[in-house]
Image (tube, helix red, strand yellow):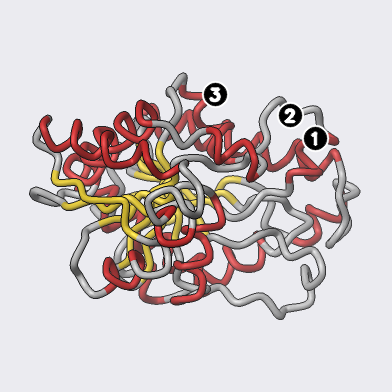
Amino acid sequence: MKSPSHKPRIGITVGDPAGIGPEIVRAAIQEQSILEICEPVIFGMIDPDDIARAGIQAGAVSAAGGRAAFTAIELAVQAAEKGDIAALATAPLNKESLRAANVPYIGHTEILAGLTGSDDPLTLFETLGLRSFFLSRHVPLRVACDLVTEERIYDYLLRCDRALREGLGLVDPTIAVAGLNPHCGEHGLFGTEDACIGPAVERATRMGIRAVGPIGADSVFHLAKIGKFDAVLSLYHDQGHIACKTLDFDRTISLTIGLPFLRTSVDHGTAFDIAGKGLASPISMIEAVKVAVKYGVARK
């Protein structure tokens, strides 16, 4: 369904209504720079009176909030699959509220994968020219280390390359694999977990992928920021999060690639401590919508 204004329709979910989602979405859709490039389509409660009538209190975990957030995502996915929206930008969820509502998923990526039948979508962060993929997401660090295997890294390099080409339109992208241990293990002096990275990179290179690594995590993100690499494959959640958020916390945008549609998101939480107080910055929400237009429309 085309917008009468011929601007792309971008779906926006407000996330958990007890968090800052409703206020940052409201601010974003009032931003002139957003209205000039797209037609926002909102899914979820944005009116404080509606939220209060549902018995949801700002800053409080609740089953009602979790259910409302999940229902909004379900409706947005249906719209995306019908082609009524070109891409989806999401405000934050609260994992405790989802659990209280008996939602059988831990977070956005898992919900979207489940609702669309997608197998292990990729998470990509982008901020100020730095892009970071993640070999693992919400697992304990001990488990994340066990997931650093030759086969998994090789598989992810193939998928990351395809995502950069098909999802973002890059030509012959170069992907660097971050090291896990200090100095990539220094030939076994600081651990042997990095030993599998080189063989995975060599296999990917033989398949035509421009991959390099391992490269020490203390320098690889800087090198990507200055243009030496198009993306970094981070080996665990916080490794890439810290690099991107330190560079620019408000403008770090999460992209989910591998769904039937593009999804972008703010990279911050529900901020229950300031919800409803008018203190939340909408910058990340605004940037998430802009990135959804930038890549989502091109993908269509």
Q: Quadrant of residue 122?
A: top left
Task: Indicate which disc, 3 or 1, sits on the residue closer to the N terminus.
Answer: 1
**How far apart, in angstroms, are the residues tagged by discs 2 and 3?**
11 Å
For the C terminus, which image quadrant?
top left
**Label drawn at residue 99:** 1
What amino acid does circle 2 point to? Val
Q: Are marks 1 and 2 in contact (CB under 8 Å)?
A: yes
Mark count? 3
State whether residue 156 is above or below residue 194. above
Give the x, y percent position of residue 243.
46, 67
User: How far separated are the C-alphas under marks 3 and 1?
Assistant: 16 Å
- What is the residue that sits farthest to the bottom in this orientation? 279
At x 33%, y 72%, the residue is 222
SS of the residue under disc 2: loop
* Label pair 2/3, CB-CB below 8 angstroms: no
Along the horizontal axis of the image, is 214 left or right of 67? left
Q: Dot 3 corresponds to which residue?
A: 114
Image vertical order of residue 279 relative to residue 34, above or below: below
Q: Is there any visible trace of residue 77 in the rendered image? A: yes
How far apart marks 1 and 2 lie (CA) works out to 6 Å
- Residue in view at x 47 percent, y 53 percent: 189
- The residue carrying pointer 3 sits among few (fewer than 14), some (14 to 19) or many (20 or more) residues within 10 Å by Cα, namely some
